[in-house]
Amino acid sequence: MSGIRATRRRRQSVLRWVVVTLCMLFFAAPLAGMLDFTTKDAQGNRTGATWAKLVDVQGVSRDYPDLAAGFTASVGLAVLTVVVMLVLLVPTMTWVRLRLPGLSRTVEFLCLLPLTVPAIVLVVGLTPVYSWVTYFLGESTIWLGFAYVILVLPYAYRSLDVGLRAIDVKTLSEAARSLGAGWGTVMVRVVLPNLRTAVLSAAFLAVALTLGEFTIANLFSRTNLQVAMFLLGKSDAQVSVAVGLASLVFAFLVLFALSFVGGRSPSRKETS
Amino acid sequence: MADTARRGALAGRRPSSALLGVVPFFVYVTVFLLVPTLVVVVGAFIATGPGGQGGLSLANVRALAEPAVTSALWHSLILSAVTAVAGAVIGAFLAYAVSTARPDGVLRRFTTSLCGVLAQFGGVALAFAFLATFGATGYLTKLLASTGLDDTGGLWLYEWNKGLMLVYLYFQIPLMLIVFLPAVEGLRPQWREAAETLGGSTWLYWRKIAAPILFPSFVGALLLLFTNAFSAYATAAALVSQGSPLLPLAIGGTLNSEVILGQENVGKAMALLMVVVVAAVMTLYAAIDRRASRWLAR
């Protein structure tokens, strides 16, 4: 038996390397194209000028004000989206579990509904809503975060749901309540620390989605990172491609680092 | 009905306080999700005449039969279907190849992280990547030109049935890996050992055991890929600057003041059409997912 298994493992590893290598070549080709494009000068010689421009923070905010503004706006959007999403979802989902189990199907349905409403459709419907938001709060880009929360809702719901399933919310909160804690204390000091991993992964998804969002911002003519990159592509293609590559590499590094920290993902925990 | 009755009973026992806790959530979702959805659904059936306000009408829905809209829908459907099938097949192979690696190994972490970025983060950056590679001055364009394979200077990149398909595959394959990997990991080695003990070959194992178990997950993932491509806007918008070959671009166009007066709500009708297609596919997905999770439940 062990002979067969060894043969199979050898064959599997050959197959693995062939398939993975082919796919990696496909994934790497356009990224290499970006690197090639950003390190060429007009004569076709190698130069690091584009990247030097990007590293110079003051130079960027002077020469590319839109890019700097878009970057700041996207960071602000990420913070607002994560905060609103957590404040909205964590207490509601915990509360529904504890006190209103009859509503859990409704909440789940509402949270998963955005999966069937593409961002481009949401934009169409949000136009009148945002004319009110602009009326009350002003025209700042940051209020797009309200719409981003809706886009994040299904993914955040799923990861928080996994987290809540893993702990016994009822016993924990009853224990805390019987020791004299108010509901606020239960949420902040009992439920939230127990949901750390789930909250982290929901927050990461929200940040990634916000930093990569283009559709809604572009169609509402607000400038976030992606829109700034898109607009810059028309005037200074090299810098915009460099920003694109940098953002991809940055996102990859964060994800790669996260796969080592924060332990194993729930799905993997189940298999082992 | 049962739901409301239960809610009533709860509210009766603990007057108002328990329900108050979920009010913020419901208000928020109503304002930013339900109202927009209603705006689209209702707006699709309201005609705006030259004088401004109009009444209920099927004019917008009828406008969907115009050749510009039907061809955009057709292109979107074909593009989504082709990239979903190709992406699902290639991604499934990749997922299986990766699943045979050590679970905590670097290869696995590297691939899943890379795929996470490419599948979800892309948009404009992916379009730029392909412009830099296959555009007029891209290095692969020059390479292809020097070998005589392609002398159009990379113009094919902007066509929905050539370049866009390749770009869409670039985020469909990674998405397939992410969605399908848990299913492949659910295949237990014991099943294969059991088949071998009973004298089954590798081929028999794949045909009689692995394929039937993976099939629902595969179809479910394929449907997810379809809706993903069908509703994608950013990449296509960044790549295609003229015309609206795809439905999302056509909808975007109606918002970008390229509209003929009195046709504002045609965009809402197109949006509704899109929701109908996505909702139908997602309903099918939910049904299949229930079936698929039967074998993955642990």
Image: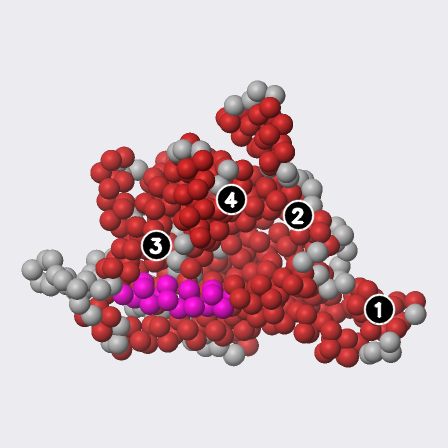
Judge by depth and name the residue closer to the eye, A181 or B100. A181
> Image point 63% across, 38% down: which residue?
A168
Gap between marks 3 and 4, in whole Å? 29 Å
Tell me which corner region of the image, top left, top right, bottom left or bottom right, holds residue B54: bottom left
- Residue count near mark 4 (Cα–Cα under 10 Å), binned few <14, some 14–19, many ≥20: some
Distance (Cα) linking label 2 and label 3: 31 Å
Disc 2/disc 1 C-alpha distance (Å): 27 Å
**Residue A246 at x, y percent in the picture:** 52, 47
Q: Main secondary structure of the magenta part?
A: helix
Circles 2 and 3: CB atoms closer than 8 Å: no
Front label number (2 vs 1)? 1
Which stretch is magenta?
A: B269-285
Residue A203 in the image: state x and y as whole percent.
52, 41
Which quadrant is the C terminus of chain B positioned in? Answer: bottom right
Could you tell which of marks 4 and 2 lies nearer the N-terminus? 4
Q: Amino acid at mark 1?
A: Glu
In screen coordinates, is A33 left or right of B70?
A: right
Chain identity of mark 3: A
Sequence-first tag of 3 and 4: 4
Mark 4 belongs to which amino acid? Pro
Q: Give the Cα distance between marks 4 and 1.
A: 43 Å
On the image, numbered disc 1 is attached to which residue?
B193
Residue A253 drawn above or below residue B174: above
| Tag 2: amino acid | Ser
Residue that label 2 marks: A265
Which secondary structure, mark 4?
Answer: helix
Mark 1 vs mark 3: give the one in front: 1
Which residue position holds label 3?
Answer: A122
Q: Are marks 4 and 1 on the same chain?
A: no
